[in-house]
Amino acid sequence: MVEELLAAGVAAAVGVTVYVATAARIVKQYERGLVFRLGRLRPGVRPPGFTMIVPLVDRLRKVNMQIVTLPVPAQEGITRDNVTVRVDAVVYFRVIDPANAIVEVEDYRFAVSQMAQTSLRSIIGKSDLDDLLSNREKLNQGLELMIDSPAVGWGVQIDRVEIKDVSLPETMKRSMARQAEADRERRARVINADAELQASRKLAEAAGVMADQPAALQLRLLQTVVAVAAEKNSTLVLPFPVELLRFLERAAEAQPVPSERQGGGRAAERTPAAAPRPEPAPSGTEPDAREAAPLPDAERTAVEAPDTVAGASAVPELPDVVPESGTWPGAAARTRGRSEAGEAGDPLP
């Protein structure tokens, strides 16, 4: 009898052990359990830890409550300003209602992924290229609302949606690069022009101060010389004021020119003025002694001294008739020339 009782007790212990091993379940901290008994969802959610179900009758379904990072494949679309782009994003979501996530939708991960792709294509078509590149915060909020609206009924909450990358065609990249370069060049020119304007105003003020104080210009000149000499150059560039050149030019123009009286007969003696040659009288008329001009020294010497040509002496021919004045033309010219020289105080030739 005792042996039978002992065997029954061992069998019962084994049965209990098998039952417990079959019915025991472990739910992790980041999971929640749903029990389906004969296909019907049992009310309540099994918390994390040790739990028991009825073997062969109940079925435990565990749901992950962690935040899921779901990458959205790159979607190609045309923006509102007719630019073809490829945009990819990432969605962060988590399950807030395990029963709806299991019962209301077959695969909530796949459903969220497809909804994210559709919403991303819709956002691309409604936005401009500049918004996709610079105003992403607003687009992220709009995309999050578009995905979160149907996901609430699935027991899923969308925490955050981020547009990760925007791929542009190569031609568009080159066009944008040229536009950016032109804009930067425009800003550089505006900055340079503003700097020139400010510098010109300061130079005008400095010029006014130097005009009031001439010594300032000299000090500035000395500073320039010191700055050039500090470079240890073999050549020293010394600026020369243009005003000084103009002053010297005005002084040279104002200097008086010496007159013939002050120049004296010495200059006239050194460089005798050449008298104009007398015009020949017309044929058949006698020269008038009153209208005869004085001859130069060289011609007077030629008249007084006979010329020698080819070893023979040539005597100038004199007219046979004496003029009415009683003097020869040459004598009158010589007499007038000597009288003028005598008045000037020079010795007679």
Image (cartoon, rainbow, N blue to C red):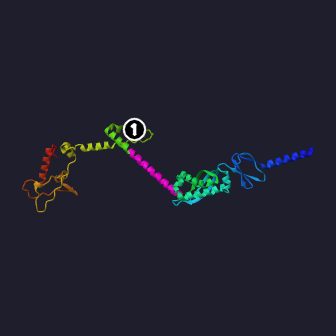
- In the image, 35: left or right of 181? right
| Foreground pick, 186 / 40 | 40
Q: Residue at x 41, y 48 (%)?
A: 193
Is residue 127 shown above or below 243? below
Q: Is residue 145 left or right of residue 309?
A: right
Q: Position of residue 280 (x, y in %)?
A: 15, 59
Secondary structure at badge 1 equals helix
Our reading of the magenta stretch's main secondary structure is helix
Question: Which quadrant does the N terminus fall into?
Answer: top right
Percent x, y of residue 187: 45, 50
Residue labelled with disc 1? 223
Q: Is residue 168 visible?
A: no
Q: Which residue range is magenta in the image?
A: 173-199
Q: Name the residue rendered at 47%, 54% in the picture.
A: 182
**Three-letter code, disc 1:** Gln
User: Does the magenta-highlighted stretch encompass residue 125?
Assistant: no
In the shown orientation, is residue 341 left or right of residue 131?
A: left
Q: Is residue 250 visible?
A: yes
Taking depth in this image into account, of 207 and 124 the one nearest to the observer is 124
Q: Nearer the viewer, residue 190 or 215?
A: 190
Find residue 115 and report its horizontal and vertical position in percent. Answer: 61, 57
Residue at (35% x, 43% y) in the render: 204
Q: Position of residue 73 (x, y in %)?
A: 62, 56
The part of the image, by quadrant, that contains residue 86 is bottom right
Image side of residue 149 versus residue 64, left or right: left
